[in-house]
Image: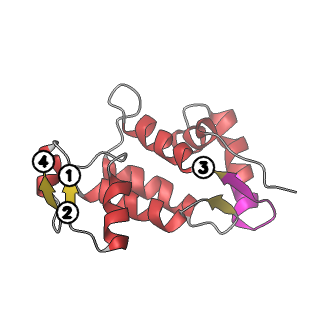
Amino acid sequence: MTDPFIDTDVLIRLLTGDDPVKQEAAAALFRLVATDDVAIAAPESVIADAVHVLSSPRLYAMPRDRVRSALAPLLRLPSFHVRNRSEVLRALDLYATTPLDFGDSPLVVAMEQASADTLYLYDRHFDRIAKISRREP
């Protein structure tokens, strides 16, 4: 049997409290996950979507470091199965401490893991990232 999956909206209700009834239900689920009584899963895209929604100026406008501090403890729960968990956590760290969008952070994580230092692209926002040499094709 496979673990049930969770969608972004449950994470948002849990972390924002914008709907107290749904927040309590989500909190109850995550209490079970925290005690390993229930296991759940999510693809990396659910986490990326949560980052986008929480940080969106039109929605919740959470600062980057607060987004990380809200999501990281959930990602560290052993019964919350997210593929590439350590890479997603590292991407959250980069998102919180650099000007990179969360969508660009996994690229830097992959480069770190490969010990790569050269990146072909046109966007100049990578110029401020230490250990990355940007080149235009």
Residue interval drawn in magenta: 30-41
Q: Which residue is labeled 3 in the image?
A: 43
Marks 1 and 4: in contact by CB < 8 Å? yes
Q: Which residue is labeled 4 in the image?
A: 136
Q: Residue at x 36, y 33 (%)?
A: 56
Q: Amino acid at mark 1?
A: Tyr
Q: Is residue 31 magenta-colored?
A: yes
Q: Amino acid at mark 3?
A: Pro
Q: Residue at x 17, y 69 (%)?
A: 131
The mark nearer the N terminus, 4 or 2, is 2
Q: Which residue is labeled 2 in the image?
A: 118
**In this view of the protein, which residue sits in the foreground, 86 or 118?**
118
Marks 3 and 4: in contact by CB < 8 Å? no
Q: Is residue 117 magenta-colored?
A: no
Marks 3 and 1: in contact by CB < 8 Å? no
Q: Residue at x 78, y 49 (%)?
A: 4
Locate residue 79, reporting x and y percent.
70, 64
Marks 2 and 1: in contact by CB < 8 Å? yes
Give the quadrant of the N terminus: bottom right
Q: CA distance from mark 1 to mark 3?
A: 27 Å
| Element class at badge 4 | loop
| Marking on residue 82 | none
Q: Amino acid at mark 2?
A: Thr
Q: Residue at x 38, y 56 (%)?
A: 106
